[in-house]
């Protein structure tokens, strides 16, 4: 018997910069057996199947995506906590996808990733580098490609402190390459899947955090 894992998603959009036109997917399954992992990404959908070595359960889902993605430019990586994919949207558009899936279907296991989500009109004020937690040089997987991961590049040296003078400044971060975005995604993953087959109800067409309700006036 297979179980739907908890799938968290968030997105960014851009009508001019492909690297900022992406969808994050975090599949919360702890300690995935690499030999059991079956991940397939097409231009119109994604499928996932894997077994956790912790609870010995098989997890599986398949989703038709709202719009097409570029499979060659999309990345994925595996950590001890989760499987993470960054899908590059094929069409450059300033507007967000209204939902993750093609059809407006309620999927209780698909939820908004509030740790990464920003509203469409506020995304310019949330730099992609900060949202990604400072990606390094670890390569990702593409579709059903090789599970091997590239080595992580070393950190640049910090300037030495001379005499009683102030410490030399550390070089600023340069522009981020989309191919380097996956290094630390696993460490920021949310909690693992629940013990039941279906987590608490949630609407997959959730297009972002709900507005805050006005506080009642004091007496």
Image: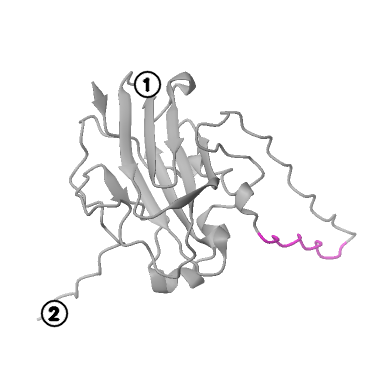
Please state if 177 lies on the left or on the right of 165 as rendered: left
Can the viewer see residue 82? no
Mark 1 nearby-residue class (10 Å; few <14, some 14–19, many ≥20) = few
Quadrant for the N terminus, please.
top left
Q: Please report whichever mark, 2 or 1, sits nearer to the chain's N-terminal start.
A: 1
Give the residue displayed 40% in from the left and 19% down from the top.
Answer: 53
Q: Is residue 95 left or right of residue 58?
A: right
Question: Of helix, strand and loop, which mostly describes the magenta segment?
Answer: loop
Can you tell which of label 2 and label 1 is closer to the viewer? Answer: 1
Whole-angstrom CA distance, mark 2 to mark 1, is 50 Å
Horizontal side, residue 162 vs residue 207: left or right: right
- Helix, strand or loop at label 1? It is loop
Task: Residue 87: say if magenta.
Answer: no
**Residue assigned mark 1:** 54
Using the image, determine if residue 141 lies above or below residue 117: above
- The residue at the point 35 percent across, 39 percent down is 191
> How many numbered discs, if any?
2
> Which range is magenta?
164-175
Q: Residues within 10 Å of mark 2 (few under 14, many from 20)?
A: few
Rendered location of residue 13, percent (x, y): 46, 64
Residue on which disc 2 sits: 218
> What x and y, as percent, mark residue 125?
49, 72
> Quick one: which residue is furthest to the right in this view?
163
* Residue 166 painted magenta: yes
Quadrant into which the C terminus falls: bottom left
Could you say which is closer to the camera, residue 160 or residue 144? 144
Residue at 50 percent of width and 60 percent of height: 21
């Amino acid at each position: 018997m297979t179980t739907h894992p908890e799938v968290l998603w968030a997105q960014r959009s851009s009508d001019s910069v492909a690297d900022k036109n992406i969808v994050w997917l975090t599949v919360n399954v702890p300690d995935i057996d690499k030999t059991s992992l079956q991940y397939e990404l097409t231009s119109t959908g994604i499928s996932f199947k894997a077994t956790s070595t912790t609870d010995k359960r098989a997890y599986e889902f398949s989703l038709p995506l709202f719009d097409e993605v570029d499979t060659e430019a999309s990345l994925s990586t595996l950590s001890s906590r989760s499987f993470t994919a960054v899908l590059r949207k094929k069409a450059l558009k300033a507007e967000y996808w209204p939902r993750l899936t093609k059809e407006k279907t309620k999927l209780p296991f698909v939820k908004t990733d509030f740790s990464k989500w920003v509203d469409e009109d506020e995304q310019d004020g949330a730099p992609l580098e900060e949202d990604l937690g400072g990606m390094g040089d670890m390569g990702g997987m593409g579709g059903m490609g090789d599970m091997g991961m590239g080595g992580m590049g070393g950190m640049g040296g910090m300037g030495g402190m001379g005499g009683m003078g102030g410490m030399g400044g550390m070089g600023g971060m340069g522009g981020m390459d989309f191919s380097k975005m996956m290094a630390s995604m696993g460490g920021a993953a949310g909690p693992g899947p629940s013990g039941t087959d279906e987590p608490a109800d949630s609407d997959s067409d959730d297009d972002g955090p709900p507005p805050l309700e006005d506080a009642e006036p004091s007496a």
